[in-house]
Amino acid sequence: MRRASLLALLFCCLAPAAIPPPGWVEAAEFPWASIPTHLRERSLLWLKSTGITHISLAPSGDPAELSALIRTVRSLNLEADLQGPVPASMEALTRPHGGPLTPPLPGPPLRVSALAPDALKRVNTQFLTSSKAVLWTDVFDTLSGPTFRAGAFGMDGTERPAALTLRRSAQLTRYWGHLRVGLRFAPGAQPVTPVPILSVRQFQTPTGASFVEVENVARTAWHGDLRAAYSAVHRFIALPGVTVPAHGSLRFPVNIPLMAGPLCRACSAFATPDHLIYATAELTAMEYENGILAMEYYAPSAGEALLQLSRQPSGPLVAGGKLAPFVWDEATKRLKLTIPAGQAPSRHIRIAIAVEPPDATAFFPGAKVLLIGEENRLTAQYSSEAISQRSRLVPLPGLEISRDPTDPRSPLESLFHLTPASSAIDGDTAELAIEADGIRLSHAQPHLRKPAVLSFSDGVQVRLAPNSSLALYPATIPVSQRAGREITVVIRNNAPEIRTFQLEVTAEGLEFSPKIANVTVGVSASRPVTFRIFAASAKPGLHAGVAHLTGHALATEPVRFLVLPTGAAVGWSAEGFHFLESLRQRASFLPGRWLEFIGKENGRDALPAGGISFAPGSLRTAGDELFITTQPGKAYRLADLEPLLPKVLPRRPE
């Protein structure tokens, strides 16, 4: 059991770092007024997952919406500025009062587009040469009036290649950012065989920890040895077999102490001389827990790590999720670890080695999900009864915790009851930690999830660009007035047990069969449920509805049904979009832009992705017609549009 527990710990992930201390701030602009309301929470969750912990908010817009957004920021344990002084009305939301708002970023900050090819280079240069902050822009897709602007994270929830650069930069800031103030240039670093295509610079902290920043300006990858200052013995050493991608850069660690601190979290069990001599991959995290030293690297190609240790590690080594050999030199007390190349697209890899059997261990074998608003049972396992008796689960705000008395039949286990507040955000994580005698023994990061979630798979999506679409919210589903249709509702059960639910869909003027569906859904699984809609007695146009889930969990999800008559069209509007739609075709508009003209039989859009511009002016729909304020007396019907395709609607003057 002990070895199985050790292997489980070796395969675990590192804990996320807290908000970096002052000295270097890397923030992201969050253009909330140009992001649909229902996507803001999801967008912030994604940003948090990248490692960015500070966002910059424009103070303009609806004050009530801004206040709601700031509450979400606080719930996610992020911080934010308002691109200027905090108004007196929001003073209670500032950091001194326990809120998330901070003063403006130091600077003015350097604005860096996430879409720029040289984005990472600009951020690294700013980090090494200036105390001013960096503000990432173009992080999110935005829609402001008729203007769509692509970002690194799409409105459909997809990550684009630029997001990888943002993640990598955030990870470097999380690991090195706190050292910014004390960094100094260390001369002498260079390729062992000088080449003009490389820029090599080494920077060192007052304690001797350093990194070598290497940029390759060539069109091909460079492979060779690097010369770097090694302050532990006051001489230069070679970093062998280094590979730097074409038009890329890497940051190689040198002389990183294995002592508790931001560079090596919880590394309190090592001797003072113990340290990482070098690594030929980009180090982004290092942590010691339960006798295991774990490191995370950005590794576009394979490399190695060399450590100076006072004693031979017990092993095993897990690299990239697989057992791997390691080399120990008893004479020099040096440990060499292989770093496999990280898998595309992230190129990140985790390696972990068991250094020694710890005196005390504790861990959560099944802490993956905590259900919001429900009592969750979580078992902790310990290496001894004494540790079990002296340990505690570190309390967290918004999480009720209680512990059962120890069962004499299982003295090495404790059962905890955890209830996340109902205000917790679905998709966030909780940082759980067991400590004894003031020392953290183990941690886990379970996801916070609603017990059950409903979604519709048949809703209208509007294509805004070649690689970006926006699903309307609430989901809007076209229905034939005469024939009706089938719809699918997906139930997601996030509980670690099989659960049974009752699902009902209702909407004014519509009938559904079955009226109520009894559904059993497996552990952490999804199940589609089909309903038949009858709309013969419903009027053409939009009908608001709702899906109700009862049983082992409660959930509701709003929905809209668009009833379409045979042989006629309906004009309708939602979320700033305007539509003319029939059973055969759908035309989509924004003010000043004709977005789509879709034939439903083949799904083909007769317009280019992103649509075409036309005369500006506000839009409105009535009956089966579309009106433009700049063209009084003129109405467009669906039947009028197809002949206009070759000539295009009246264009905006260039």
Image (spheres, rainbow, N blue to C red):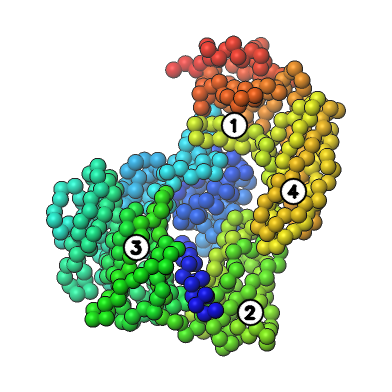
- Graded by Cα atoms within 10 Å as few (under 14), some (14 to 19) or many (20 or more), the crowding at tag 3 reads many
Q: Amino acid at mark 3?
A: Ile
Q: Is residue 621 visible?
A: no
- Tell me which residue sits at (51%, 43%) in the image: 158
In contact (CB < 8 Å): disc 3 and disc 2: no
Q: Which residue is mark 1?
A: 462
In contact (CB < 8 Å): disc 2 and disc 1: no
The percent coordinates of residue 482 (x first, y second) are 81, 25
Mark 2, mark 1: which one is toward the viewer? 2
Q: Which mark is residue 339?
A: 3
Element under disc 4? strand
Q: Which mark is residue 556?
A: 4
Q: Amino acid at mark 4?
A: Thr
Identify which residue, 525 or 136, lies in the foreground.
525
The percent coordinates of residue 119 (x first, y second) are 35, 45
C-alpha distance separating marks 2 and 1:
51 Å
Element under disc 1? strand
Q: Amino acid at mark 2?
A: Ser
